[in-house]
Image (tube, coloured by chain):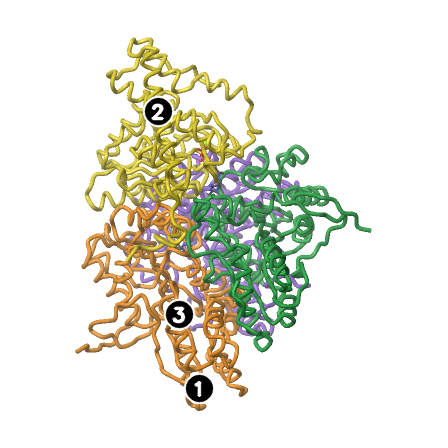
Chain colours: A purple, B yellow, C orange, D green
Amino acid sequence: MIAAPPSGPVPYAREFALGLLADMLRIRRLEERCAQLYGEMKIRGFLHLYIGEEAVAAGAMRALAPEDSVVATYREHGHALLRGVSMNAILAEMYGRREGCSRGRGGSMHLFDASTRFFGGHAIVGAGLPLAVGLALASRMLGEGRVTACFFGEGAIAEGAFHESMNLAALWKLPVAFFCENNLYAMGTALARSESQTDLCVKAAAFGMPAMRADGMDVVAAHEAAKRAVAKVREGAGPVFVEFQTYRFRAHSMFDPELYRDKAEVQRWKARGPIHTFSARLKAQGMLTEEQFAEIDRQAMEEVRRAVEFAEAGTPEPVADLLLDVCARR
Amino acid sequence: MIAAPPSGPVPYAREFALGLLADMLRIRRLEERCAQLYGEMKIRGFLHLYIGEEAVAAGAMRALAPEDSVVATYREHGHALLRGVSMNAILAEMYGRREGCSRGRGGSMHLFDASTRFFGGHAIVGAGLPLAVGLALASRMLGEGRVTACFFGEGAIAEGAFHESMNLAALWKLPVAFFCENNLYAMGTALARSESQTDLCVKAAAFGMPAMRADGMDVVAAHEAAKRAVAKVREGAGPVFVEFQTYRFRAHSMFDPELYRDKAEVQRWKARGPIHTFSARLKAQGMLTEEQFAEIDRQAMEEVRRAVEFAEAGTPEPVADLLLDVCARR
Amino acid sequence: MNAMREISYRDAMREAIREALERDPRVFLMGEDVGRYGGTYAVSKGLLEQFGPERVRDTPLSELAFVGAGIGAALGGMRPIVEVMTVNFSLLALDQIVNTAATLRHMSGGQFGVPLVIRMATGAGRQLAAQHSHSLEGWYAHVPGIRVLAPATVEDARGMLWPAIEDPDPVVLFEHAQLYNTKGELPAAPREDIEHASVRRAGGDVSLIAWGGSLPKALEAADALASRGISAEVIDLRVLRPLDAETFLASVRKTHRAVVIDEGWKSGSLSAELAARIMEHAFYDLDAPVARVCSAEVPIPYARHLEEAALPQVPQIVGAVMQLMGTSA
Amino acid sequence: MNAMREISYRDAMREAIREALERDPRVFLMGEDVGRYGGTYAVSKGLLEQFGPERVRDTPLSELAFVGAGIGAALGGMRPIVEVMTVNFSLLALDQIVNTAATLRHMSGGQFGVPLVIRMATGAGRQLAAQHSHSLEGWYAHVPGIRVLAPATVEDARGMLWPAIEDPDPVVLFEHAQLYNTKGELPAAPREDIEHASVRRAGGDVSLIAWGGSLPKALEAADALASRGISAEVIDLRVLRPLDAETFLASVRKTHRAVVIDEGWKSGSLSAELAARIMEHAFYDLDAPVARVCSAEVPIPYARHLEEAALPQVPQIVGAVMQLMGTSA
Ligand SMILES: Cc1ncc(C[n+]2csc(CCOP(=O)(O)OP(=O)(O)O)c2C)c(N)n1
Ligand SMILES: Cc1ncc(C[n+]2csc(CCOP(=O)(O)OP(=O)(O)O)c2C)c(N)n1
Ligand SMILES: [Mg+2]
Ligand SMILES: [Mg+2]
């Protein structure tokens, strides 16, 4: 059973609300272009699109402060972008250029950016969680008061890394916000075929950790949940778990024939799409006109156009530097 | 807070009740001798004594059928003995003799016996659980109706292997009885310093698995819980988790200075000792006289004496056979 | 007679799995997305429909537990084929493989065996970057108690699985991801050998020793060398543990020169063991030190040109040979 | 002047940890039972009392997560020392070490480093059987992006930790369990070098290359050889990655013969890399093939006589040298 599309008044000032809309559109337009560029073989390797899930990153990122830390997965273009990594650097990275945010060495799955404390970009499912626990431990020991936001998919919950990390964070009351993006599938494996207990909040509660659930297709609900969670973590009472219920509109990666779900299900979820439902609500409230939407969208596409230009003009890392940064430069 | 010593009527026929008593005494006397033999350097390596926890193995083993399978840890002398491995073969193993149940290659931590389906003897904490899940899967696929009993300490619960195995067993509804021996410490680490949630049944329930708790110092409570659990598993409804609350009277291993707990605590638990409390109840019921107790004890000590003789007379595996059984003989 | 037909490595592997499932009811396939998804590399596509979810079993993301469950199921009388998506992820299950599967028979005094086959993809070349491009076959080849196979041809993809399943001990089978799309001639009765290396091309001047994804490169290099008048013998190792030293030693004793091609990082790779073995047993037959063409010691980078520079390539193999022959490439 | 005092390896290591904790507030020690229990091998005994539970941090049994947390804490500005009880258990954390710690700097284009020290006990010899007796240093030495150290003397136990902590990249430090009780002379200002191998005994006839728990055996063998009129040079490798080839190559170029002693299983052990390196760079200086004395390829058995037979022993080293010298032992 799929819930009704997100609806109801948007409780934000116009500027903030349009900002959320712009955030989601920037991800959407960037990734639509990425899919094309993959077809043109400008982008290679694995490419995991976030299309359909934009409300989660949009809602969550605006709940974080600049001094906070972010850890993400291989499906992280949107997270990097909204954390403040330039679209230019992200796309150049997917092009494998030295102007890329990882000098072309990471690619789509491994975006990194020290200036925004964006700690990547991890492609071993579950591997980001222990890292986040450690970042939070450092912040606590250094008295920095940072919150570490750790994004991961529901598939990671079956991994031992989830169990061990949740326990450590809760046992040591560390400032981690565990943001689980439950898009119902891990590649082709539906949640019910991977978890004996499909209520993820019950699993989190078993660590004595506060857990909440939010509609990940509703940027308002996502933002409110993230705000509550981050505030609670910042108080110093320990970690919080948030399940964002969302859905991936595209294939898992560009190699996925999608044998495991039917088109109808995808259609039903698209009816709950985060962008069109949110803009409809804004219009209903008179916060947004079709022209204004078009203008925001145009700006997003313009940003993408410039990013493609930037990436195309990028330079390859010299082969002579292949071994650079395997260890620290001396 | 430590509960009052086990008390109340023993609801068993005399023969069965005295059998339970004899089981516990056989473990106790064997291990007391092992501790001496370790001092005499007849037994080497790591030696983990079960003294104080005998009621758990005694109660649990009598809930199993011969066709069932057993997986245990490095603290498994008692489990092997009560599963039916001869004391001779167990002690010869600790002597490193070829007459040992693992030909002297496993030692105290790695007792194995195919004839009783005793699958070891595993010294990587948590590593027995996936194995038990697989044994249960095989039994289900082969339609054999075996129950696999998996013994492990509460320390293993923090390991990813616990989480992944519990989920697999529950998800696939496999016939596994997870017998957790909660003796409150993992080496020197008290449960409260290793788990954010110290109610282990709550943790098990988070997998949608039935969970029960039993006083592991009371052989009656232990046996009743194990019986209920095994019966439920045999019905085919899936795995069951049982927490046996017990206590280790001796050091973790022969190298442990026991800096982490005070003597008073140990004394309080000894007041709940499984053997003297059980025999007191049997006496109160007129099921046991001091003479009969002495006779059962004498038999246990006689069995130990003969086992030492057997082990002393054992022969070393020829060095020429060092590489034997690394791979199957052809 | 042994009629040939053309088939892809992927399809050959699928046929081998299907045959095993048909031939022995104790065999089942278990791993992440082997069922409904059809297999990450589409190897198991269609098998779920044919054999059902009990025997083509999708697992949660739990490498440690489902590999361990495979070990337990093997102990319990089944003949599991466990698929770990790639060797990188197998690190999560390494404890079960090294500390349990490989030790059980010996540690139990010969009472228990683990007739388990673990399949995994390995290798780089598809711009998957530093967490999806490892070649750790050499690590597995270090562990007593397991057999390690690296089928490089469609015939071996088709023929090595069944004997691996019949092996009473754990077998780890590596499929280089770059091979799945390769096509080749498959005999009606493929060779079922998991003991020996093979001479894939006879030659007299130098021995090229390779396996898995490096075999095609070695053969290509041999062609290039032939055009320069150098006759290279190409050995396909096939079995990484236990090593079939006789075969490669015989070749080196004949050619007096050897180049080992290994996609692993050079330091501590399997190529080192091969070089050491050759020195130990054929030192006085060598006209020159054994050369090694391996991957650069760097986490494999994403950018295509950097990844290519990091991996063993045909020109390097040719160059290494020319140097051994005392002529510069 | 540099006054000497006698100290055990265990106490030297504890002093090194204590000094690090005193010297840098960002340093903390984390691992199973490092605190209240006092450390499995009593290395950290007393440190909890001195530094408190925040900086001497007991962890649950969660190797993957607490090693990963160490990586994260290093990223976050701390200088963690993570203790994994023994190398066998480190397999559970290998994914974090190989796929994350070792790749982060390169994968992030040089933006992030992991200044982490991971300490672990290694090796056999105490009848702990097949799941507690591994020597897997060679595996770690295969991985680009990390430094691997094997202190074999009390001076190195005392002196290698601080520079390891100052290293901006991950360092894995192996302590052979048999060394903890050994005693030796500690200079007031111990050498702080994590770059070079050391010549522990000069000699002209043969080079014995060893490290960690095998060094004492190599030195004992050198004594035995001296009594037979053979002068052996003993090289303590000290740093297993990156290898200090200059030092052992210089020795071999002088002695023309080498024996590598490695407690790892022979096939695919680090000894193979050393043999291969020597052949690659000193082939024409060798009077005989490089010999290797390693562990038998068997899960280490419990029985004392079998364990002894499985491990490298002095008589084998002597025998290997005699054979190289063309005289039978
Ligand atoms: C340890 C590990 N196992 C398997 C994989 C292969 N894999 C990549 S993504 C993925 C699915 C993960 O699903 P989920 O965590 O729900 O994230 P989503 O892709 O849905 O965002 C799998 C199985 C991996 N990268 N790492
Ligand atoms: C994976 C792993 N980590 C650490 C150890 C070292 N170790 C052996 S027993 C033990 C304590 C286990 O405690 P628990 O599971 O409660 O069992 P108990 O000893 O109390 O019976 C530890 C830490 C190990 N054997 N395996
Ligand atoms: Mg998902
Ligand atoms: Mg315990």
Question: Is there any visible trace of residue A299 in the rendered image?
Answer: no
Q: Kindly report which numbered mark, 2 or 3, lies closer to the viewer in this rendering.
A: 2
Residue beneath the point at 31% across and 28% down: B60
Q: Quadrant of the C terminus of chain A?
A: bottom right
Instruction: Compare residues B107 and C178 and report the one nearer the observer.
Output: B107
Question: Which of the labelled discs sits on residue C225, or is there none?
Answer: 1
Question: Is there any visible trace of residue C123 in the rendered image?
Answer: yes
User: Are marks 3 and 1 in one subunit?
Assistant: yes
Amino acid carrying label 3: it is Ala
Q: Secondary structure at mark 3?
A: helix
Amino acid carrying label 2: it is Glu
Residue beneath the point at 22% across and 60% down: C20
Q: Secondary structure at mark 2?
A: helix
Residue denoted by label 3: C245
Instruction: Compare residues B189 and B292 and report the one nearer the observer.
Output: B292
Residue beneath the point at 50% across and 74% down: C292
Q: Position of residue C251 (x, y in %)?
A: 40, 78
Up-down relation of residue D113 to residue D304 (above or below): below
Question: Which of the labelled discs sits on residue B302, or is there none?
Answer: 2
Q: Secondary structure at mark 1?
A: helix
